[in-house]
Image (cartoon, helix red, strand yellow):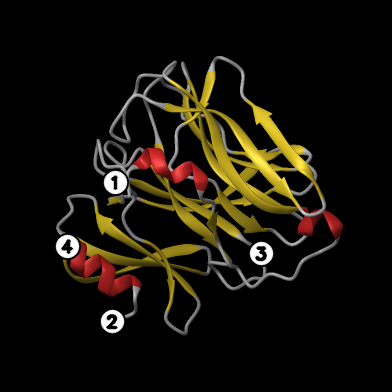
Amino acid sequence: MPRRLLPCLALWVSLGVAAGGAQAQALTGATYVEPTTRYDHGVLGDAVEWGALRLSRDGAPDLLIRLPQTRVFEDLAPRLVDLGEHRAAMVVESDLERGARLALYTADGLLAATPFIGQRNRWLAPVGAADLDGDGQVELAYIDRPHLARQLRIWRVVPGAQALREVASAPDLTNHRIGWDSIAGGLRDCGAGPEMVLASGDWSRVIVARVRGGEITREALGPYSDAAMARALACR
């Protein structure tokens, strides 16, 4: 599906986390709106990004979150995630001078975000959100600079602060090539809890990464291909 058709959709991430009150139930959908060319990075295949995020709420009017002129949403589609007390839209937000960060927005505005990468035209590609280590808390995973650093980074919300805390990282993994209008791999659960399906840094192997005891382990499933990645995601 062409990237410009994606804003009518919201990616839903089912985490099996119990809702924690009215705020957790507030968001029912999220879409990017207000296309803009003010950031010409083009990492997703063209120079059009998004200037605003529309959040749909249960029993209330939609909420529009408009970024300042120095930022864009440089992403495919928002991902709704349950965080226990909050349901949030997980997005990639890029600053024209400081590059990308992963951010969580609720009906109250910004809930939490990672630091910006720190340099223009530096991006991150989300993997997903789930309780990756079995401790009952939700972690957020992405590949930091999938074309350069190729580092898997895993973060958790810091209660009471507009920040995310990094809990694990691992090198030599990726999920995106420059110009792709899609992100490879993602999360799967084959019966032993959530796992991350990625590519090795040189795109030679399909890799399954897991978080165990605060460390990231990896298993090579075989040579990389689109079909092999699809089989891995389907637990075949």
In this view, 194 is above or below 200: below
- How far is disc 3 from disc 2 in space, using C-alphas? 28 Å
Q: Disc number at residue 176? A: 1
Q: Which residue is mark 2?
A: 236
Marks 1 and 4 sit apart, C-alpha to C-alpha, by 13 Å
Which residue is rendered at x = 55% and y = 69% of the image?
133
Marks 4 and 2 in Cβ contact (< 8 Å): no
Secondary structure type for disc 3: loop
Q: Amino acid at mark 1?
A: His
154 w.r.t. 149: above or below:
below
Residue 169: x and y in percent read: 44, 52
Comparing labels 4 and 2, the label whose residue is closer to the camera = 2
User: Which of the pair 216/144 is nearer the observer?
Assistant: 144
In space, the residues marked 3 and 1 are separated at their CA atoms by 27 Å
Q: Quadrant of residue 226?
A: bottom left
Q: Earlier in the sequence, mark 3 or mark 2?
A: 3
Residue denoted by label 3? 137
Q: What is the x, y in percent for residue 116? A: 52, 29
Which three-letter amino acid code belongs to the residue tagged 4? Tyr
Q: Is residue 132 above or below residue 122?
A: below
Say few, some or many: other residues with alpha carbon within 10 Å of mark 3 (under 14 / 14 to 19 / 20 or more). Answer: some
Viewer-nearest of discs 4 and 3:
4
Which disc number belongs to residue 224?
4
Q: Is residue 155 left or right of residue 196?
A: right
Task: State the residue at coordinates (62%, 61%).
Answer: 138
Disc 2 marks which amino acid?
Arg
